[in-house]
Image (cartoon, rainbow, N blue to C red):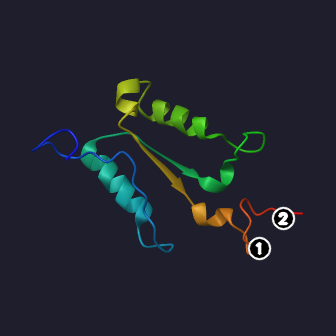
């Protein structure tokens, strides 16, 4: 096990998948309360790869720092929830809902 025998394994990233309305975001909020860590949620459709249109991923990190009242150590244990990822694909199957030419 990472960290040696008897040491608990700490997973840094978790991906929750499921249909709308099953409680994925509620589960994250409950887990956040259990570990007393800051939480920020964001709609995936607001982000862009370049940041020219919409938000950048670094904006989410800054939001997390704000949720931790500027405490960088606390923010490093925070939870970032990127919701609505399924909305990034249109019925044509292209990312971001755009058309390819």
Q: Is residue 82 above or below residue 66?
A: below
Secondary element at tag 2: loop
Q: Is residue 97 above or below residue 37?
A: below
The total of numbered circles placed on residues is 2
* Residue 5 place in picture, x, y as percent: 11, 43
- Check the picture and name the quadrant holding the C terminus: bottom right
Depth check: 81 or 15 in front? 15
Characterize the local packing of mark 2: few (<14), some (14-19) or many (20 or more) Cα atoms within 10 angstroms.
few
Depth check: 91 or 72 in front? 91
Give the image quarter of residue 54.
Answer: top right
Q: Which mark is residue 99?
A: 2
Which residue is identified by label 1? Answer: 92
Depth check: 100 or 41 in front? 100
The residue depicted at 47 percent of the width and 36 percent of the height is 64
Give the image quarter of residue 56.
Answer: top right
**Furthest residue toward right:** 101
Characterize the local packing of mark 1: few (<14), some (14-19) or many (20 or more) Cα atoms within 10 angstroms.
few
- Marks 1 and 2: CB-CB under 8 Å? yes
Secondary element at tag 1: loop
Q: Does 95 sit left or right of 43 as displayed? A: right
* Residue 1 place in picture, x, y as percent: 19, 47
Real-space CA distance between mark 1 and mark 2, rounded to the nearest whole angstrom: 8 Å
Q: Which mark is residue 56?
A: none
The residue depicted at 36 percent of the width and 45 percent of the height is 12
Q: Does 70 sit left or right of 87 as displayed? A: left
């Amino acid at each position: 096990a990472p960290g040696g025998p008897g040491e608990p394994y700490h997973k840094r990233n978790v991906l929750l998948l499921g249909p709308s309305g099953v409680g994925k975001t509620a589960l994250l909020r409950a887990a956040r309360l259990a570990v007393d860590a800051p939480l920020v949620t964001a709609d995936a459709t607001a982000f862009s790869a370049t940041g020219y249109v919409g938000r950048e991923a670094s904006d989410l990190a800054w939001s997390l720092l704000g949720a931790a009242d500027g405490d960088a150590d606390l923010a490093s244990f925070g939870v970032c929830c990127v919701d609505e990822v399924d909305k990034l694909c249109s019925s044509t199957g292209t990312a971001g809902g755009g058309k390819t030419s």
